[in-house]
Image (spheres, rainbow, N blue to C red):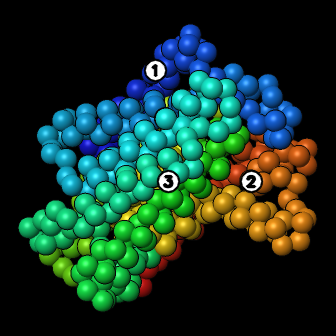
Amino acid sequence: MIAVLSAGAIALLVSLLGTPLFIKFLVKRNYGQFIRQDGPTAHYTKRGTPTMGGVVIIMATLLGYAAANVLAGRMPNASGLLLLFLMVGLGVIGFLDDFIKISRQRSLGLSPIAKILGQGFVGITFAVLALQFPNERYRTPASTQISFSRDLGLDLAFLGAGVGLVLFVIWANFLITAWSNAVNLTDGLDGLATGVSMLVFGAYVLLTIWQANQSCQILSLAGPRCYEVRDPRDLSIIAAAIVGACFGFLWWNASPAKIFMGDTGSLALGGALAGLSILTRTEILAAIIGGLFVLIVLSDVIQIGWFKMTGKRVFKMAPLHHHFELMGWGEVTIVIRFWIIAALFVCLGLGIFYAEWIVG
């Protein structure tokens, strides 16, 4: 527990104190946000606001995790290193995307093909490695089974190990792409994605601590009264570090934002959420815990799909938060109400997770 608390506290301090220094660095080099001309007019005032703040979130998470391990006298485990690889890898792709946008002053960064190839390389590498590194009890960081709050028994390897690996890579990359895009779409208002991420990763801190305390490896049990997750303590430390990093960053990202996380942050956080869902065996439950992110994506899908079928729009503008902006809601009002909705989804997800354990 000391490591978890230390990771959160150190990441918070690094993010809180490091963000203003990074803002000065970006301002000095005129690395500001490019604003879409077809977006809400209120956003025009945000043009030039420093972006790529996700760099601070990533660095704070890494430093929090490393320092916590040193203070607790423990070594990193495979699951934790894989999760950080996924987070940093997608963060690098987001950084390149952001850098191209601000250096060329345009709304498009990396080409779609380059982005797909980059995300595919990171995602495939993560998925393949997640099925390696068995511990002394022959448990690997991930499983080829589809999971809800634990593995459901629906094994992707039912036709053999080779086919199972391919299907798992496809499934894992679907989750990685879905969650990274979900956080990216949510990052449209000051503090929205940062605050929601704090709540969602906070839920995973509690969830992974519970899994660590009810680990089949520690209790020498099997079945519904324990969890087959390989390294839940490592995952709880990283989740706590992400919460701390987002907490410190939110101080500067809240309205009126002094800095945006950019694709650097949104892709990294989305990747971390996807990785946590896979490594904690909560792939479907994550869609409930992160329900606000899912709603944002659905609003975009519905808008595009309905427009292509009928030529009409369901919302004034997608994603959903921009619809309420055009209805006249204030930005802060939208953000706070969306935080409340996100908190309700988090409570629902954790309630289902606990109820499953009680019933089991």
Q: CA distance from mark 1 to mark 3?
A: 34 Å
| Kind of residue at badge 1 | Leu
**What's the amino acid at mark 3?**
Ile
Label 1, secondary structure: give it.
helix
Quadrant of the frame with the C terminus: bottom left
Does the CB distance between marks 1 and 2 fall below 8 Å? no
Query: Which tag is nearer the camera, tag 3 or tag 2?
Result: 3
Residue 220: x, y in percent?
14, 75
Q: Is residue 215 left or right of residue 325?
A: left
Judging by the rendered image, the residue that carries numbered circle 3 is 116
Instruction: Decide: is 176 above or below 220.
Output: above
Q: Quadrant of residue 159?
A: bottom left
Q: Residue at x 25, y 33 (%)?
A: 67
Q: Earlier in the sequence, mark 1 or mark 2?
A: 1
User: Cα distance, mark 1 to mark 2?
Assistant: 32 Å
Local crowd at mark 1 within 10 Å, few (<14), some, or many (≥20)? Answer: some
* 318 and 124: which is toward the camera: 124
Q: Secondary structure at mark 3?
A: helix
Q: Nearer the viewer, mark 1 or mark 2?
A: 2
Q: Secondary structure at mark 2?
A: loop
Q: Does the CB distance between marks 1 and 3 fall below 8 Å?
A: no
- For mark 1, what is the residue? 17
Q: Seen in the image, is 266 located left or right of residue 63?
A: right
What residue did someone put label 2 on?
A: 319
Instruction: Report whether residue 262 is seen.
Output: no
Q: Mark 2 is on which residue type? A: Pro
The percent coordinates of residue 283 (x first, y second) are 44, 70
